[in-house]
């Protein structure tokens, strides 16, 4: 059953459908960032890490958002700014964020709105990264602070960068082998757990085995 979500624009409490967790490939794709302040600067850092082609639209911008390869349009947002855009981030005032959301809805473009869930159709979770392993935590935009606290709690349970990288390399080799041998997907998880325990010792063995046998 879907949980109760934030209030709708009419002020009524609404029930939200479950969100689809997804990781987007944005490298080389056009992304629009509306806003030029502190929040926009933080969002820009995240977007640049994906390799996206970022365009910023804002009447005024902080100096630190002026980066090589980032297009800056120093003016108010216009709906045409969303032309050919794959993803948009609204980090401006609530009024401007709603304008971005309405224009993006008409163009079928997903929007992340900073601290404004009513103007968002996509939510950026609190992320933990270890090599190419990523864990994202979302509260559907209801409490980013809670997502951050949960991230801190989970972060201490995960292997470090070097260990995660070695786990991933081993898992990748085994996956290719199992694909060649046509090992059913349902059988691969216990085989992977056994292989990792043999390779890297029993550091996570008890907890992982308990979870596996109880699922």
Image (cartoon, grey):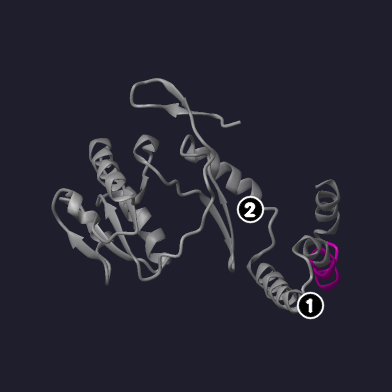
Percent x, y for residue 126? 52, 49
Horizontal and vertical percent position of residue 30: 31, 64
Towards the viewer: 5 or 136: 5
Which of the two labelled residues, at mark 2 and mark 1, occupies the earlier sequence position?
2
Q: Answer whether residue 17 is visible to the viewer in this image.
A: yes
Give the tally of numbered discs.
2
Q: Is residue 62 something one can see in this rendering? A: no
Q: Is residue 69 above or below residue 89?
A: below
Q: Say which quadrant the N terminus sits in.
A: top right
Any magenta on residue 201?
yes
Residue identified by numbered label 2: 155
Q: What residue appears at the point 75 percent right and 75 percent down from the top-left corner?
A: 174
Neighbour tally class for label 1: few under 14, some 14-19, many 20 plus, Cα within 10 Å: few
Q: Is residue 11 magenta?
A: no
Return the residue at label 1.
Answer: 181
Q: Which residues are magenta?
A: 192-202
């Amino acid at each position: 059953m879907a949980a109760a979500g934030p209030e709708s624009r009419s002020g009524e409490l609404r029930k939200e459908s479950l969100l689809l967790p997804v990781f987007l490939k944005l490298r080389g794709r056009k992304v629009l960032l509306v806003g030029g302040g502190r929040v926009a600067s933080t969002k820009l850092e995240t977007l640049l890490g994906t390799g996206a082609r970022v365009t910023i639209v804002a009447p005024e911008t902080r100096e630190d958002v002026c980066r090589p390869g980032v297009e800056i349009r120093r003016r108010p947002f216009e709906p045409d700014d969303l032309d050919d855009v794959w993803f948009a981030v609204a980090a401006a005032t609530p009024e401007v964020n709603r304008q971005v959301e309405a224009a993006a809805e008409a163009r079928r473009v997903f929007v992340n709105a900073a601290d404004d869930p009513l103007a968002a159709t996509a939510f950026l979770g609190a992320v933990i990264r270890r090599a190419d392993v990523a864990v994202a935590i979302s509260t559907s935009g209801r409490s980013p602070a809670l997502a951050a606290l949960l991230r801190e709690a989970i972060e201490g349970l995960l292997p470090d960068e070097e260990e995660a990288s070695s786990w991933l390399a081993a898992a990748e080799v085994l996956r290719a082998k199992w694909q060649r041998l046509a090992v059913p997907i349902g059988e691969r998880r216990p085989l992977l757990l056994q292989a990792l325990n043999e390779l890297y010792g029993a550091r996570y063995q008890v907890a992982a085995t308990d979870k596996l046998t109880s699922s």
